[in-house]
Amino acid sequence: MSETETYEVLAIKYAEMKNRWRRDNFIMDDDHAAPMPIDFFVWVIRNANRTIVVDCGFDHKEAAARGRAITALPREVLKDVDVDVETVETLIVSHLHFDHAGTLYDFPKARFHLQDAEMAYATGRCMCDEALRRPFTADHVCEMVKSIYAGRVQFHNGDGQVAPGVTVHHTPGHSKGMQSVRVMTERGPIVLAVDAAHFYENFEQRKPFPIVHSVEDMLASFDTLEALAVDRTNVVPGHDPLILERYPAWKPETKGLVHRLDQGRVS
């Protein structure tokens, strides 16, 4: 397949965590006690031919267990942008942490795209260590295992094409099998870093996030993101509230909740 299609790309906020500090977001930050909230997103990539969802967030049960506040369930915010989870055929799972793979059960017809390394990591010896397994929830991982046995998982070993103009790229560091998504738009490629970089500050100032499998790999992945995007301003981090300031709202009434990435940054 060749890059012959372009897409609309939406960032959709479904949850937030206000009571958070810079020490939670950066290793050895100079201003570690300053507040720095985090937002949680799912992403939609679509054109007249197809609709692709990136990640599926978490539910109320997980929110309560993890101390997060859900604005609306992922399936509900997707419905607000005319995406019916019952009919979605393609879901890219960036990695298997609780906030990215927590509602797989809401996508009964979807084929899940996942890195080989992430499945091995989430089910292997590293999960014997609480420090590494903490961001995972066993039920979510088991849901993916069941999907494998149902023939609903497409594995990628490094770079892979999901659709014309949509590719996934192994960007490890935060998780061993972390993958980011490159999307062709009318203004050129944009890169959904997802958790390869949680905040703009992570990759722009090369400040690693503290939930990490490999700091060395994370720093190398920052370089990968910028190379894939051609222009670093086309890299979109996974959790930064600034996304909702730097990109225009999808519609006036969705300001602060749904913003459109393919039209370019406004700040």
Image (cartoon, grey):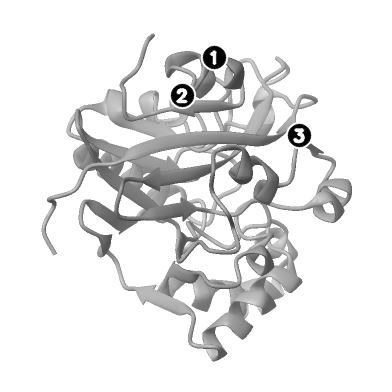
Q: CA distance from mark 1 to mark 3?
A: 18 Å
Pointer 1 or 3: first along the chain: 3
Mark 3 neighbour class, 10 Å CA radius: few under 14, some 14 to 19, many 20 or more? some
Point 55% across, 90% down: residue: 149
Quadrant in which residue 162 is drawn: bottom left
Between 200 and 10, the residue placed more toward the observer is 10
Pointer 2 or 1: first along the chain: 2
**Is label 2 in contact with label 3 (beta carbons under 8 Å)?**
no
Q: Secondary structure at mark 3?
A: loop
Q: Is residue 205 left or right of residue 239?
A: left
Point 60% across, 54% down: residue: 56
Pointer 2 or 3: first along the chain: 3
Q: Secondary structure at mark 2?
A: helix
Comparing labels 2 and 3, the label whose residue is closer to the camera: 3
Between 94 and 27, the residue placed more toward the observer is 94
Identify the amino acid type marked 3. Answer: Thr
Q: Secondary structure at mark 1?
A: helix
Q: Give residue 201's mark.
A: 2
Q: Is residue 120 visible?
A: yes
**In the picture, which quadrant includes the N terminus?**
bottom left
- Which residue is denoted by mark 3 in the rendering? 71
Q: Residue 19, how many percent across, how many down?
A: 80, 25
Q: Residue 255, how many percent across, how many down?
A: 58, 17
Q: CA distance from mark 2 to mark 1?
A: 28 Å
Q: Is residue 177 left or right of residue 169?
A: right
Q: Residue at the top extreme? A: 267
- Which residue is denoted by mark 1 in the rendering? 252
Q: Is residue 257 left or right of residue 93?
A: right
